Amino acid sequence: MNGPVAVTGASGFVGQALIGQLLAAGRSVRALVHRQPLTISHPDLETVTGGLSDERAVARLLDGAGAVVHVAGRVRGRTDADFLVVNAKGVSTVARAALASQSVTRLILISSLAARAPHLSPYAASKRAGEDRLSAATMTTDLSTAVLRPPAVYGPGDRELVPLFLMMARGLSPMPSVPNARASLLHVDDLAQAIVKLLDSTAQGTYELHDGHGLGYSWDEIATIVEGVAGRGRGWRFRIPETALRSVAMVNMLGARLFGYMPMLTPGKVNELRHPDWVCDNTEISRATGWQPLIPLEDGLSSLVKRVPSKSDKGISNVT
């Protein structure tokens, strides 16, 4: 594979962890930077300024690149269009630029496990639409593609799960009232390593992945692990009724329309939170690439709650 690896969504916590992994492996990287600057400086790192809606910037990003990892995505929005413009149309833009570049031979799309259930929310539907657009754009071409569907990802720089874990560490554990619900989790460094492994393979298709805990976790199990890592006894676990979640989501949507912000808790997000099965299976990606997760939840949480390094192999980088 000749040329640098192009990375979209480079300023996000997944993008920065991936760039750290690639640079540590001796790969040159070209990163698309939109609003938030990178915190990484390296002689083998080049940046291109622009967003996914800037087709010229995307073309510059991929000009001469050997591969592209499309990490960029939108997790907050008020309307279907807010999500589709990035999570679906953005995929089309990157795929077209990759085909036009005449140098890119491999494209990896970082989707989401939510794409498995597109009926749940505009976000989930937009992620599935992005996968479908990639398939349609590249089906009759020689471009090698693969899709990763990670579960909930946490780690340094995460603004969604880490605040929840820190709240649990202080003894307050909010959780949806969903009997028997289970979900997989994944540390961002394990995700970054999986992306590199997939990038360097010839594997094509759609792959799920998790942290090695094959049955996933219940909300109570997550709280217990956090409390153990924090060195405290059982905290206060309070169940949030569906009606309360939906009421807050509706108020949040109203406020978003009035004040123009992008809300996180929406009716669609409530559907995702209350979905009973977000458990992944590592079998296919491990068979295709040899990747195995290295960071159990206890170790990953220790690095966040106690501010100590996670137990990971050399070459894995916590980039913030």
Image (cartoon, rainbow, N blue to C red):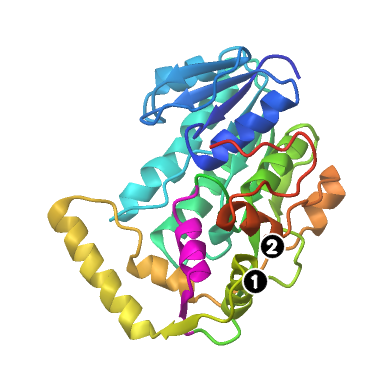
Name the outermost residue toward the left: 258
Disc 1 versus disc 2: distance between alpha carbons? Answer: 8 Å
Q: Considering depth in this image, is 199 or 88 the residue closer to the camera? A: 199
Rendered location of residue 142, percent (x, y): 71, 28
Query: Contact (CB < 8 A) between labels 1 and 2?
Result: yes
Residue type (three-letter) at the residue carrying disc 1: Gly
On screen, residue 291 versus residue 4, left or right, reads right
In the image, residue 162 lies in the stretch drawn in magenta: yes
Question: Could you tell me the amino acid type at mark 2?
Answer: Glu
- The residue closer to the viewer here, 158 or 253, is 158
Q: Is residue 319 left or right of residue 177?
A: right
Q: Which residue is mark 1?
A: 228
Query: How many C-alpha atoms fall within 10 Å of the one at disc 2: few (<14), some, or many (≥20)?
Result: some
Q: State which region is magenta.
A: 158-177
Q: Nearer the viewer, residue 294 or 198?
A: 294
How crowded pointer 1 is (Cα within 10 Å; few <14, some 14-19, many 20+) is rated as some
